[in-house]
Image: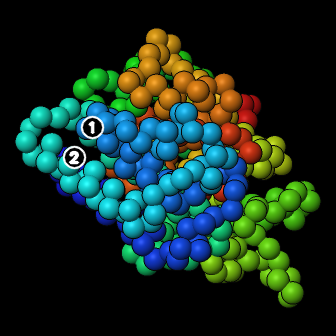
Amino acid sequence: MSLESLVIDARARTFDLVRDLSDEQFRVPLLRTINPFLWEIGHVAYFQEYWVLRRDGLRDLYDSAIVPHDTRWHLPLPSRAETVGYMENVRDRVLDRVRSGSFDPYFVLLSVFHEDMHDEAFLITRQTLGYALPEPIEPRDAPAVHVRDSGDLGIPGGEYTIGSTADEGFIFDNEKWAHPVTVDDFRIARSLVTQREFLQFVEDSGAPHPVYWKRDADGRWLRRHFDRWVPLEPDRPVSNISWFEADAYCRWAGRRLPTEFEWEIAARHGGCDQMFGSVWQWTSSDFLPYAGFSEDPYKEYSSPWFQTHKTLRGAAWSTRSRMMRLAYRNFYTPDRSDIWAGLRTCALAS
């Protein structure tokens, strides 16, 4: 896609994800893991206006670095119609800038990928609150098309290159820079852990069931998919589990989570299924800077979260395909179970 097309596409996706919501649904409860829709859609436009057009007139309303999370429910925000108009206006001015040639491609792409991340967050919010899945959006990991390849893939130990290089196009600062790492031989599961396998863990160990699971009056296990309860799909990857749940499953199964380096090496090697586009995959690795890390202009992207978050790799069905890269590093606190995250496992060293 051209830069112009990317800007148009990202904003259209945002509108698709909130257009059907009533004004009452826009007024979400104050929860630690979500933002008010009215604030968040305005924030997306402000971020683009600030980084591409270099205007910060609405900083006190929409700059996430200075507006504390819990205050976002009580700000004197523009109306919904005014906010949509603001989003359209910013988009059109950015498009004018792109068409005129007087722009920095880096910051246009930064604004697009930032919007892609918030678009995934809008879906997470809808799942959290039990809102319907918007009609244009469909999961890509339906059981009917999920083919599992059992067993482990063996990866020989040695020196491998991890991270991104300057000639790979747009990258985030936490991917800098490509560097060698040495790993021992390891064996990684070709397939993601399924709902059937995780249910065996829950029933055998007495562990709490995932947040969006329940048993009905007949003892059948169900999973909440947005506003609908559906029977568990045995061969579908388990999702919406925290890092703590993923780690507990591994200990029960006599396995372990891969490090993020092992995950990237396996992804580059080939031979594993659904590395992208089903669920994010927890790794054992803390989210840390690579040696020689330096912040990009958007300093709040990575630095505030080092040491306190765990790294996830891959991508979920809700992730835009342009975000799916081998070296991309996602990161969340280990207690988060609202995101579409699951796991694949590694064999313990013999």
Q: Which mark is residue 52?
A: 1
Is residue 273 at least partly visible in the picture? no
Apparent side of residue 81 relative to residue 23 in the rendered image (left or right): left
Q: Position of residue 196 (x, y in %)?
A: 72, 67
Q: Position of residue 297 (x, y in %)?
A: 38, 24
Cβ atoms under marks 1 and 2 closer than 8 Å: yes
- Tell me if mark 2 has few (under 14), some (14-19) or many (20+) residues whose alpha carbon lies within 10 angstroms of its own: many
Q: Position of residue 154 (x, y in %)?
A: 56, 38
User: Disc 2 designates what residue?
Assistant: 94
The image quarter containing residue 161 is: top left
Q: Which mark is residue 44?
A: none
Give whichever of 306, 223 is nearer the camera. 306
Q: How is the image coloured?
A: rainbow
Residue sitting farthest toward the left: 100
Note whether 345 is above or below 36 in the view shown.
above
Q: Could you tell me the amino acid type at mark 2? A: Val
Residue drawn at x 50%, y 59% is 38
Q: Could you tell me the amino acid type at mark 1? A: Val
